[in-house]
Image (cartoon, rainbow, N blue to C red):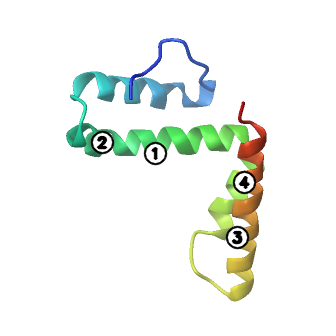
Amino acid sequence: MAMESTRIVAVQCERLYQALCECHRRIPAGQGREVSCRHLNRGLAECLVSVVCPEESEAVRSLCNSGGTALKRSQCRQAQLSLSICLSSHQS
């Protein structure tokens, strides 16, 4: 995946974006890069999701962090659906 020089990154996520770009610059493409940069990629994704859909992201984080009761699992699924809808509404 080539990093584009033209981008829009939330200010809150800028450091993660820069770290991911640096990881991609230092490590050749392939499985080694995937393994080495995975935590930065995931962190940036989580950061961007939390900026775009903060309430929905927090609901998923709090309701889906463990198995829990049938009610909690149902609430987790509903929170995941709400997050999915929120993210879909921001796609171009």
SS for dot 3: helix
- Asked whether 91 or 7 is in front, the reply is 91
In the displayed structure, 6 sits above or below 20; it is: above
Which residue has dot 1 on it? 42
Q: Which mark is residue 77?
A: 3
Q: Residues within 10 Å of mark 1 (few under 14, many from 20)?
A: few
The image quarter in which residue 1 lies: top left
Residue 34 is marked as 2
In front of the other: label 2 or label 1?
A: 2
Mark 2 secondary-structure assignment: helix
Q: Position of residue 84 (x, y in %)?
A: 71, 53
Closer to the chain start, of discs 2 and 3, is 2
Mark 4 lies on residue: 83
Image position of 12 (left or right of 59): left
Look at the image and tell me whether residue 56 can be seen: no
Q: Could you tell me how many numbered marks the image carries?
A: 4
Q: Residue furthest front?
A: 92
Q: Residue placed farthest to the bottom in the image? A: 69
> From mark 3 to mark 1, how far is it between C-alphas?
21 Å
Return the disc, 3 or 1, that comes first in the chain's sequence: 1
Q: Residue at x 75, y 84 (%)?
A: 71
